[in-house]
Image (cartoon, rainbow, N blue to C red):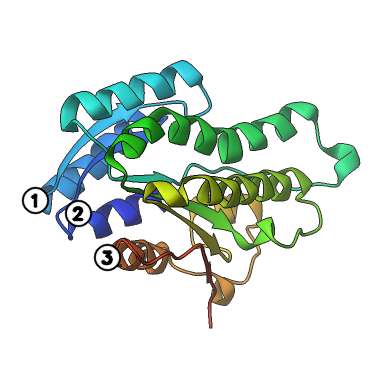
Amino acid sequence: MGRSIALALAREGARFVLAARTESELNGVRDEVTALGAEAITVPTDVADPQQIADLAKATLDRFGTVDVIINNAGTGTVLGPVQDTTLEYWESMINTNARSAFLLTKALLPTMLANQSGHVININSTVAKKGVSTASAYCASKAAMAAFGESLAAEVRSEGIRVTNVFCEPMNTWLRWAATPDFARDRVMEPEDVAQVVVDVLKLHRDVMVDDIPVRRR
């Protein structure tokens, strides 16, 4: 998903920072976006680690001086099971990666947006944030937490010229989907490129136009 968003933004001439745990994967995406003429740097980051997020924010501002858009796209969730079989460690890992990361990154970069009286925070979420599904309590709870964070943030910063958009996606054709549910029907998944285009389109809207929630579903 992150790669598709990066490529879509690169085609629009964006300058951006790529952050994820795996440096080799980051470098591969960086090479793809720079081949499209975009400027990008990579910062290997555990997005649930406050110090690493602080380092990421510093690297961003040191390189570009400001930030216009934050895209909270970190996500995980490859294990399904009933509540009684869900370990505390797994529950916490879901909350940390899927919700805590959005809070940490937004908190780190929000002061710059507030100073500019401008900015856009986009949270890539899941439809299970609105309606939980069986055997995925930890994942659903983490996505619901992310949604509530986004809604609260939007109410908090709207008067400061900052927009917040929550994109709620149905199952995507990503490795996470197939790791969690390898038998999921292939004709029911969405392509990451479609969601990436939604991100581009909402970023192109006039800054006075607010789009709070976008549900994205396969026809």
- Is residue 46 left or right of 155 when viewed as pictured? left
Q: Tag on residue 48?
A: none
Residues at marks 2 and 1 touching, judged by CB atoms closer than 8 Å:
yes
User: Measured from the top left, where is residue 64 in percent x and y?
Assistant: 17, 33
Disc 2 element: helix
- Residue wearing tag 1: 37
Q: Amino acid at mark 3?
A: Lys
Label 1 vs 3, first from the N-terminus: 1
Q: Label 1 to label 3, Cα distance in Å?
A: 19 Å
* First along the sequence among labels 2 and 3: 2
The CA distance from mark 2 to mark 3 is 14 Å
Image x and y of residue 1, in percent: 42, 53
Q: Secondary structure at mark 3?
A: loop
Depth order, front residue of 71/106: 106
x and y percent of residue 63 in the render? 17, 28
Query: Residue 93 falls in which quadrant of the image?
Result: top right
Please give the name of the residue rendered at 63% of the width and 63% of the height, measured from the top-left corner. Answer: 127
Three-letter code for the amino acid on which mark 1 is drawn: Gly
Please report the residue visible at 42 percent of the width from the left and 28 percent of the height from the top. 108
Mark number for residue 10? 2
What residue would you read off at disc 3?
204
User: Compared to 116, does 197 lie above or below?
Assistant: below
- Residue 182, horizontal then vertical, whole percent: 63, 58
Q: Is residue 104 left or right of residue 29?
A: right
Residue drawn 59% across the image and 47% down it: 152
The residue at the far right in this view is 84
